Image (cartoon, rainbow, N blue to C red):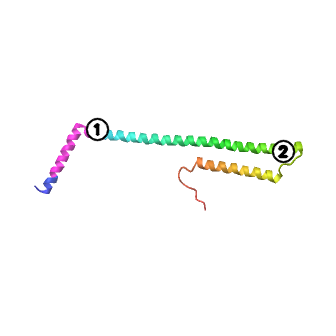
Amino acid sequence: MTVNDFLNAINQATEASKDNLESKGISRKVEKLEKDEMKSLEADRYREHNKGLHDTYEMRRKLAYRIFWVVTGTLIFDGVFILLHGAVKAIWNLILYSDTVIIAILSSTTVSVIGLVAIVLHNLFPNLDGNKKKTE
């Protein structure tokens, strides 16, 4: 027996086994199982992705709520500070702080609030497409 005869015999046996499997419908069942498994894996992947998006949304919502109250508290503090300073000056004619100190306090809290909001907004809503702006 030559090598070519041996290879021909193997090819014939392979073809016969394929025909036998196809006649029994086994290959169709295997293909159907593979398709079902792929659909299941894809559904699991989408489910995990959606769970991650939901978790990110909840985290952002909580953080935005907390930052809102920090900013609100800071602005209320500034308002009360100005009103008390004006009331003390009007009622008792007493100057607690000079105008430059009042301006410095209000300026620093305003810059802090604006910076806080800018940082939080930048981190809550990042550039999702991955393209960064180039600064020249």
Which residues are drawn in magenta? 8-30
SS type, badge 2: helix
Q: Looking at numbered disc 2 in the image, what kind of residue is underneath it? A: Gly
Q: Looking at numbered disc 1 in the image, what kind of residue is underneath it? A: Lys
SS type, badge 1: helix
Q: CA distance from mark 1 to mark 2?
A: 85 Å
Total number of numbered labels? 2
> Which of marks 2 and 1 precedes in the sequence?
1
| Magenta span includes 22 | yes
Q: Examine the image and state in which quarter residue 80 appears.
A: top right
In the visual, does 64 lie left or right of 43?
A: right
At a point 54% along the width and 43% down the height, the residue shown is 56
At a point 16% along the width and 53% down the height, the residue shown is 7
Q: Position of residue 110 (x, y in %)?
A: 72, 49
Q: Quadrant of the N terminus?
A: bottom left
Magenta: main secondary structure? helix
Q: Position of residue 45 (x, y in %)?
A: 43, 42
From the image, state whether disc 1 or disc 2 is nearer to you.
Answer: 2
Q: Which mark is residue 118?
A: none
**Within-10-Å neighbours for mark 1: few <14, some 14–19, many 20+:** few
Residue at mark 2: 86
Asked whether the residues under the numbered discs 1 and 2 touch, taking CB atoms below 8 Å apart as contact, a structural biologist would say no
From the viewer's side, name the closer residue of 57 and 30.
57
Residue at mark 1: 29
103 vs 62: above or below: below
In the visual, does 106 lie left or right of 95?
A: left
115 vs 62: above or below: below
Q: Quadrant of the C terminus?
A: bottom right
At a point 13% along the width and 54% down the height, the residue shown is 5
